[in-house]
Image (cartoon, rainbow, N blue to C red):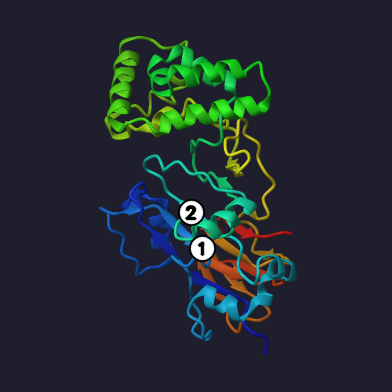
Amino acid sequence: MAAHRVFPLSCVVQQYAWGKMGSNSEVARLLASSDPLAQISEDKPYAELWMGTHPRGDAKILDNSILQKTLGQWIAENQDCLGSKVKDTFNGKLPFLFKVLSVETALSIQAHPNKELAEKLHLQAPQHYPDANHKPEMAIALTPFQGLCGFRPVEEIVTFLTKVPEFQFLIGDNAATQLKQSLSRDSQAVASALQSCFSHLMKSEKKVVVEQLNLLVKRISQQDCVECMACSDNTVRAGLTPKFIDVPTLCEMLSYIPSPSQDRLFPPAWSQEDPYLSIYDPPVPDFTVMKMEVPGSVTEYRVLALDSASILLMVQGTVTASTRTAQATISLKRGGVLFIGANESVSLKLTLPKDLLMFRACCLL
């Protein structure tokens, strides 16, 4: 009989401090819905649900007929399940980590290297860069969400430097002048100027940052700052509370904020030659997340086979899943996670006449 190549997973929750608390978190609600034994602590944050084989969050296999206990262990012994191209390209490993994030406060500022630089940094300092892979990311909004990605057009940043003296104070006169002068020069000059501005801001002493932000809070609370885009669109005004007084608040005046009509982000990678990107330029990722919506009037839906292993998350709905290799059907409801091996299709039968909402992560080369 063919080996099982489709099975449910129990996935790891990361309780980072920036996550939403208790049952206010979508991560916690998905966990509670999928696992009736899960105990949600209302005083703890539930920040991320990890679906994959990461060493700090390898998913457990919920199938007693499979000897391996985790998805990573199973894939190591069944590499053909990845698909031929994925297996060869990524050395027999699942090349993506699928996540759900539930965010209460601002996350840390991150910059991920491209593949070439990741390999170099890993060789030079593996203790700081344990992964030789690049980390291209794609973020899809399940609810209204605001994120900072890359840098704004330089003209906008210069406007903020002119209209927000507290911002210019932290950037410094020299760096601000360099950025203004770069407008009439080439892209390398712009990149160098952005590097200088960003470095000055990030290296500012916390005490000085707090002082300048308090001045900004006081000033905008006493006058109508309609001439300042950062205030008029409420991006800075909403963040300037004692809880959020930090450097990332001012980074909104440097960073690109996608329009509300966009439902996904592609954070750009950086290279050794060009670590400071002056424009937001979405790359073409080597992974895909498919959104699948099925009306409740449909009684059966077929998840098609792909030449890639994939992970499916049920966000809404209740089904029973069956495949050609499984001896029994698999019950899958909100919060349920299913691993699907390459070239395997899955039949989903709706057990309740309610719409389905699913997301499927895979790597299509």
Residue 278 or 144: which is nearer the viewer?
278
x, y percent for residue 193: 55, 25
Residue 282 or 289: which is nearer the viewer?
282
Q: Amino acid at mark 1?
A: Met
Looking at the image, do the residues carrying marks 2 and 1 touch, with CB atoms under 8 Å apart? Answer: yes
For marks 2 and 1 on the same chain, the one whose residue lies earlier in the sequence: 1
Q: Is residue 196 visible?
A: yes
- 253 sits to left or right of 305: left
Residue 130 or 246: which is nearer the viewer?
130
x, y percent for residue 4: 61, 81
Q: Identify the residue at image location x=40%, y=39%.
A: 106
Residue 290 or 330: which is nearer the viewer?
290
Is the residue 176 above or below the residue 55 in the image?
Answer: above
Is the residue 109 above or below the residue 11 in the image?
Answer: above
Task: Assign a secondary structure to mark 2.
Answer: strand
x, y percent for residue 169: 39, 18
**Which of the numbered marks, if any, corresponds to residue 100?**
2
Q: Identify the residue at image location x=67%, y=90%.
A: 1
Q: Amino acid at mark 2?
A: Val
x, y percent for residue 73: 53, 78
The quadrant of the image that shows the C terminus is bottom right
Q: Is residue 97 visible?
A: no
Q: Which residue is mark 1?
A: 51
Residue 30's quadrant in the figure? bottom left
Q: Which residue is farthest left? A: 43
Task: Assign a secondary structure to mark 1.
Answer: strand
Q: Identify the residue at image location x=40%, y=30%.
A: 249
